[in-house]
Amino acid sequence: MKNSELHLLERRKMFNGHQERYRHFSQTCQTDMVFDVYLPPQVLKGYPAPVLYFLSGLNSDGSELVRQSGIQRFAAQWNIIVVFPDTSPRGQHVADSEEHYLGQGAGFYVNATEAPWVQHYQMESYISQELPDLIEHNFPVTKERSIAGFSMGGHGALHLALNYPGRYAAVSAFAPLCHPIDTEGGRQAFSAYLGQNVETWKRYDSTELLQAASHKLPVLIDVGSEDALYPEVLQPEGFIRSAREKGFNIQYKARPGYGHDYFFIASFIDSHIEFHAQALGL
């Protein structure tokens, strides 16, 4: 795939590395896309590092994870590049909706097949193919990748890890949506983006994907016991049970008293980075 030109929008020094923000034209989504990236200090000296893709939740653009997760301290310590993609294509020419689970900020990391979404909402291909190609062309990276996410981003991280066996060393998620076809919001988004055939939705449902999963990568999931979406919307227990039955190396922790927020993520982000560092061989 032809790499598009990167335009630097912002650069800040942080833990002797750089937190940077870029814009580029996406051939996949046919619009400008923006992403953030943290480059640890060793990378600034020219030493390559593995990449962790950290996917954001509903109605986020990735900047909340940059500002509020505290991930950079640990990424600098372990020498991991962290990429924070947007959650959807954006712009006045891009289809949108007033519905909470649909439109800009709510791409669900799928490749849409239905009008008016199909032209721009190709987030699965963007995250799994175009963006890594861009990162690997422009930054000193190794061949190793890992993936993580929060909420809708946790859903994206899990289904991408299962749909692309061998591409990621490990997957972790904070409060992931594990069984979206069994939730009102998931059904609303999938029916709009993918049409009415429920069988096509299963490609993006992590609990369903486990049934045919062959590559058993390490998995870490954290949820907060006071999360308003837990357990009815997130439904992690069914995913955990199926994963363990399939022989996955899976760690699952229900954190007492924590909610669905960045305070929760910041409290445990160190354990997630250490988990990925181990899987990446650091």
Image (spheres, rainbow, N blue to C red):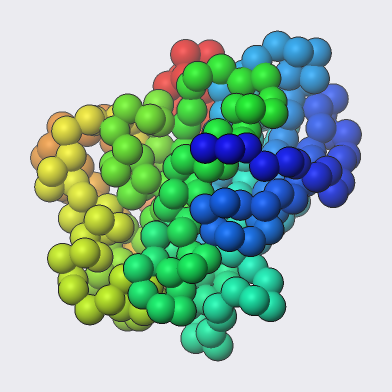
Q: Residue at x 29, y 43 (%)?
A: 163
On screen, 233 above or below 57? below
Is residue 281 among what the camera can see? yes
On screen, 190 above or below 206? below
Residue 28 pos. (x, y %): 52, 53
Residue 231 pos. (x, y %): 32, 66
On screen, 38 above or below 84? above
The quarter of the displayed image where residue 111 is located: bottom left
Q: Nearer the viewer, residue 65 or 202?
A: 202
Q: Nearer the viewer, residue 126 or 57?
A: 126
The quarter of the displayed image where residue 252 is located: top left
Q: Nearer the viewer, residue 214 or 252?
A: 214
Q: Residue at x 57, y 51 (%)?
A: 27
Q: Residue at x 49, y 86 (%)?
A: 99
Q: Is residue 253 left or right of residue 277?
A: left
Residue 235 pos. (x, y %): 29, 62
Q: Residue furthest bottom?
A: 98
Q: Nearer the viewer, residue 42 or 227?
A: 42
Residue 39 pos. (x, y %): 73, 29
Is residue 228 among what the camera can see? no
Q: Residue at x 48, y 21 (%)?
A: 144
